[in-house]
Amino acid sequence: MSPERGTVVRQPAVERSEEVDGPESWGRYPRVAQEALPLAWADDPLPSGVPVLAYGMGRSYGDSCLNAEGPVLLTRGLRRFISFDADTGVLRAEAGTSLGEVTELVLGRGWMPPVLPGTQFVTLGGAVANDIHGKNHHRSGAFGRHVRALGLRRSDGSLSTLHPGDPLFAATVAGLGLTGLITWVEIQLERVPSGWVEAQGIRFASLEEVEALDDASRDTHGHTVAWIDGLARGKSLGRGVYFRGNPAEGPATPPRRPIPRRVPFEAPEFLLSPFLLRTFNALYDHLPRWRSRTSVWKFFHPLDALGEWNRLYGRRGFFQHQSVVPDMEGVRALLALTSTRGQAAFLSVLKRFGPLTSPGMLSFPRPGWTLAIDVPNRGEETLAYLEEMDAVVRTYGGAMYPAKDARMSAETFRLGYPRLDEFATFIDPAFRSRLWSRVMG
Amino acid sequence: MTGAQRVLVLGATSGIAQAVARVYAAAGARLALVARSREHLSAVAADLAVRGAEVVLQRAVNLCEIERHRALIAEAERALGGFDVVLVAHGVLPDQKACEQDARRAVASWDVNFASAATLMEAAAERMAVAEDGVLGVLSSVAGERGRADNYVYGAAKAALTTYASGLGHRLRGSGITVVVIKPGPVDTPMIAGRKLSPRLVADVDVVGRRIHRALERGERVVYVPGKWRWIMAVIRALPVRIFERLRLGS
């Protein structure tokens, strides 16, 4: 049942069927029937009379990149560079340009994007709309801090250039795409000596150890992150591997951008856990400590090597529960709950955010520890477990990351984001996401 | 001569043309760009310049004005200092149903997709023949291989273009000019926006751009992109009418 072009599918309900048409989010849950309108130029006409939402590369995990009430606007056609000054490292590009494309362009000339997330397949527009963070948050803060200007197109026909300090800028950074269509972004890049990183992996046995490691590393290492063994219980709860790195000298020719392989099938879930678990355990048992010079592609985007790894979770998809809590006590409580519920996947990611302020009204990064746990979708029991996790986050005064969310309650959202009402006044009435309708509608 | 490649792109704002030009730009080519919309052309030119190209000419021209072709080609030749590659890439995907009911719309689409493309090739070949060198590429389509109910207005123009280019290539045999006929399958560009195609059949535009660049550099005479379409179309062309007409193909 495919809709004809020109008609708009109004389908607020979540489809259970696997046959739903339209772009997916990374977690492949929920599935929402929606029309996809590709944009080729920033001045293409937008549909009128229905709410729209920009959709870049679909790496938001839940429904913040989906629209249940109208079409999504595919922004990947807007991926032209506008200007680049190799002396100052100021780059301006259309909002559909991916961070991987930016890295590829500037790496050989001694620059890198100022903030890189776990995947290179994120558009500049998406990086702004979610005010993304990376392994260097303790030093460089969130992505939005490095945005010098951006172009915003609103449904009233206005086109404006926004700068840090403008109220609409603060609403648009981390604004989940709801303040209008971001048409271009100008960022300040970061100088790097080469395309290589001096990387270290260090095994730790407990959360105390990783905290001590992080204390010792945050002034000496530009990039830090920890992987936690999500299946460890009891005494080994909180064990994992700590990664840290610094830009290194290396060959003048930058490492080639890897082209991802596709996962050609949707794996049954049972294939997944043993596979990655074994990888993790091998790392854990045999490599207590290692050091190597790694390409920026491998260091910053390790999961990209697997291509569409989200398909390994099968047709029901998965959730990622990413929270930030002020101190390690919250992390301990979340991991303890996880280990008793038997819901989580094998690997969790832990990172300490630094004190640098994020510029967006709804920015997620704030001082504390952020913990991201992948959770295969097993239906009601999974949803119940995730709500229990949210309760822990609320108790510890934390917040959930909307870019990863498909199910949090309005209460959780409000408690984590005190500027929510102020933000709402900047929303463009013609823009809507399923997340916003679900949580705030 | 080992200097920068000198490339003229006609229809430079088309999705496939942009992808090919990006590959040339990354290699530091000199580019002359022609398209209808001045604004869109300048966005493309800026992108290619950032990627490493030297853009020596931008012209906003309606390529259906065939009387301007000679002057346009001459201007580009002067700006570039000669042609290594000329790529004829402009085209539209007309609304099949509307064309069935309105002959003028059908003819207008043939003007873009066939007449203007053929006369441009001829005009470019004339200048390239003087230099006795160069590659003349033209974007045709697998849609020109066999008429199908849902896009035969488009397919007919592309069939004519393929035939024309093949004849021109034959005529230019031994002249130093190589005619490259490019037949893409469906590509993820704005042209196919809204058509219901299986994602498996739609190729990534950057992959297509790199493949076309390689074909132009090697002077391949006929290239299907992606390559699997050579075999798919061989089968489709060979099907008996009665079986072919029972198939629901693509959109």
Image: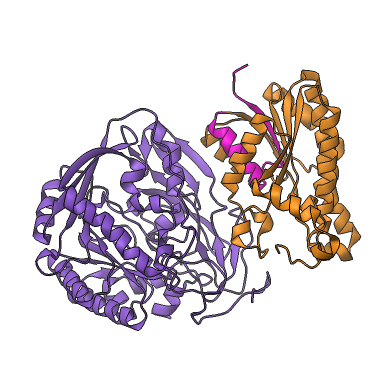
Chain colours: A purple, B orange
Q: Quadrant of the C terminus of chain B?
A: bottom right
Q: Which residues are magenta?
A: B1-28
Residue A189 image-quadrant placement: top left
Q: Is residue B65 above or below residue A404?
A: above
Q: Is residue A58 above or below residue B4?
A: below
Q: Is residue B6 left or right of residue A348?
A: right
- Judge whether residue A226 is colored magenta: no
The percent position of residue A299, horizontal first and vertical second, equals 31, 45
For image coordinates 63% across by 16% down, the residue present is B1
Q: Is residue A121 visible?
A: yes
The percent position of residue B107, horizontal first and vertical second, equals 88, 53
Instruction: Depth check: give the residue in front, A215 or A311.
Output: A311
Instruction: Depth check: give the residue in front, B64 or A248.
Output: A248
Q: Is residue A388 above or below residue A63?
A: below
Q: How many marks?
A: 0
For image coordinates 33% across by 33% down, the residue present is A194
Residue B60 image-quadrant placement: top right
The percent position of residue B160, horizontal first and vertical second, equals 85, 46
Q: Is residue A247 left or right of residue A162?
A: left
Q: Residue furthest right?
A: B103
Instruction: Depth check: give the residue in front, A295 or B4.
Output: A295
Q: Is residue B7 above or below residue A289?
A: above
- Judge whether residue B24 is colored magenta: yes
Instruction: Depth check: give the residue in front, A397 or B225.
Output: B225
For image coordinates 63% across by 57% down, the residue present is B201
